[in-house]
Image: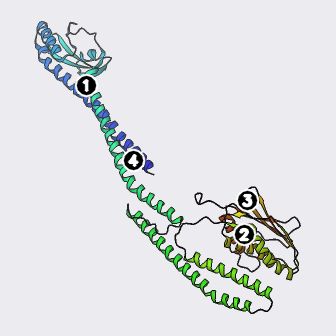
């Protein structure tokens, strides 16, 4: 923007100067020509009394003296054909003046001034003074150089002023852009100092107000989520007490473990809601242990609903770059979708393997499949919240991987969760 403003000012300045300096330069040349012509005419007029009354010798002496003083060729043509002074042939202008008409004309060497002198007894005499080209253009080149230098100086001054003006515009815009990027990077305390024209000051104030409003809304959202999560502790405590009162130890242990996992998720939610701007720490977990644990948990429900489970789990450890709680939530979301979106008795398969430096978890079922766009957050065709696959997707992205949806070879859905290795603190 700064360069474009300078270019615009330079173009306008050059065009303006051309519009003024070119006519001025032509006027300077015309004035120089007229000045030389007027001087030559005055010299010729001074010879008129002598040519009209004196004899040839006196005229010759006067002509030679005038030529020496003026530096111009001076000729006097007498009626009898005698030429006094500079010996030049009769030009058409001289022939015309011999008929009694004085004039100024152009010649090959410059310009000639001819004056008819009447009153002589033997006829009309003619005075001719030649004005050379260098006298007609005397001082023109210097004047043109001065005008050109003045034009260059004016253009440079215009560029300097334009650069200062552009700087006052570009600097506030750059500050606005920098603060916008900082806000986009979650630096909510970034603010811009209003500067520049009133319009940019207004934009800066609006951006600061927006940043403050976003900060307030995020704080309110975190507090509300934290309060809601904290309220869940009471029913969790009641659920744990109910589990401990069960007579079957296996059922009590299973429900207690589920309550503990739910409490860990709620605790993580509270911490995340209370999180401010602490730098993120590299996360890691053992995918083999977590998948095996969650498959064992869901296998009980699979047995109750008549679902055949095919397992192909590579022995661990298989470290991945995602926190254990997040990976647990992602695995539960994928397995929970199988039970939520397929009828009882539908078999499914779980496979965990290492492929090309990634750990790939594959959950495949033989149900009706998933509708297009199911991976988008909030999209659900079965009355759920639509957040399950989004949780898995975010877990994959946190580990440098991705979530893929495919159609199974026997129909149904096939979900692949690709997880990258954990990052070191230096890489993070």
Could you say which is closer to the camera, residue 275 or residue 294?
294
Question: Tag 1 or tag 4, which sits nearer the N-term?
Answer: 4
Query: For residue 59, what is the image quadrant?
Result: top left
Eye-nearest disc, 2 or 1: 2
**Comparing labels 1 and 3, the label whose residue is closer to the camera:** 3
Q: Residues within 10 Å of mark 3 (few under 14, many from 20)?
A: some
Is the C-beta separation of discs 4 and 1 under 8 Å?
no
Identify the image quadrant of residue 205.
Answer: bottom left
Viewer-nearest of labels 4 and 1? 4
Give the Cα separation between the discs numbered 3 and 4.
58 Å
Of labels 2 and 4, the one closer to you: 2
Q: Earlier in the sequence, mark 3 or mark 2?
A: 3
**Which one is in front, 393 or 169?**
393
Task: Say which residue label 1 marks.
Answer: 138
Are there few (<14), some (14-19), or many (20+) residues within 10 Å of tag 2? many
Q: Which mark is residue 9?
A: 4
Residue placed under numbered mark 2 in the picture: 375
Q: Nearer the viewer, mark 3 or mark 2?
A: 3
Element type at marker 2? loop
How far, Cα to Cα, is label 1 from label 3? Answer: 88 Å
Local secondary structure at mark 1: loop
Q: Please, what secondary structure does the residue beneath circle 4 have?
A: helix
- Alpha-carbon span between mark 2 and mark 1: 87 Å
Q: Which residue is mark 3?
A: 358
Whether residues under marks 2 and 4 lie with C-beta atoms below 8 angstroms apart, the answer is no
Label 3 vs label 2: CA separation? 21 Å
Task: Find residue 146 and name its label.
Answer: none
Residue for point 66% across, 82% down = 263
Q: Residues within 10 Å of mark 1 (few under 14, many from 20)?
A: some
Residue at coordinates 15% horizontally, 11% vertically from top-left?
64
Q: Earlier in the sequence, mark 1 or mark 3?
A: 1
């Amino acid at each position: 923007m700064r360069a474009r403003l300078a270019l615009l000012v330079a173009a306008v300045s050059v065009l303006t100067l051309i519009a003024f300096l070119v006519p001025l330069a032509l006027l300077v040349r015309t004035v120089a020509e007229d000045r030389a012509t007027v001087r030559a005419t005055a010299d010729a007029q001074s010879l008129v009394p002598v040519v009209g009354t004196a004899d040839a010798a006196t005229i010759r002496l006067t002509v030679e003296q005038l030529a020496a003083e003026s530096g111009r060729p001076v000729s006097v043509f007498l009626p009898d054909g005698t030429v006094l002074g500079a010996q030049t042939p009769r030009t058409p202008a001289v022939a015309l003046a011999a008929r009694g008409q004085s004039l100024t004309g152009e010649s090959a060497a410059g310009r000639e001034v001819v004056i008819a002198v009447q009153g002589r007894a033997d006829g009309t005499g003619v005075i001719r003074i030649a004005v050379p080209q260098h006298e007609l253009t005397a001082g023109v080149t210097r004047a043109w150089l001065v005008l050109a230098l003045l034009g260059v100086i004016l253009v440079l001054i215009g560029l300097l002023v334009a650069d200062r003006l552009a700087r006052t515009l570009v600097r506030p815009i750059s500050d606005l852009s920098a603060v916008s990027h900082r806000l986009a990077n979650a630096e909510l305390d970034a603010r811009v100092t209003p500067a520049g024209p009133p319009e940019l000051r207004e934009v800066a104030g609006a951006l600061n107000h927006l940043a403050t409003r976003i900060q307030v809304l995020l704080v309110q959202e975190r507090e509300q989520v934290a309060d809601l999560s904290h309220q869940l502790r009471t029913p969790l405590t009641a659920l744990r007490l109910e589990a401990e009162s069960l007579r079957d130890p296996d059922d009590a242990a299973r429900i207690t473990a589920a309550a503990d996992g739910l409490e860990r998720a709620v605790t993580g939610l509270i911490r995340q809601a209370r999180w401010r701007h602490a730098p993120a720490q590299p996360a890691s977990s053992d995918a083999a242990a977590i998948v095996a644990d969650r498959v064992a948990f869901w296998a009980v429900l699979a047995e109750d609903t008549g679902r055949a489970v095919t397992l192909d789990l590579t022995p661990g450890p298989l470290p991945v770059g995602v926190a254990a709680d997040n990976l647990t939530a992602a695995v539960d979301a994928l397995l929970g979708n199988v039970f939520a979106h397929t009828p009882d008795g539908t078999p499914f398969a779980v496979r965990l393997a290492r492929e090309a430096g990634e750990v790939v978890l594959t959950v495949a079922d033989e149900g009706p499949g998933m509708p297009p766009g199911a991976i988008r957050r909030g999209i659900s065709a079965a009355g759920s919240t639509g957040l399950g696959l989004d949780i898995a997707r975010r877990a994959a992205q946190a580990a440098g991987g991705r979530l893929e949806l495919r159609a199974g070879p026997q129909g149904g859905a096939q979900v692949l969760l690709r997880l990258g290795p954990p990052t070191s603190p230096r890489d993070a």
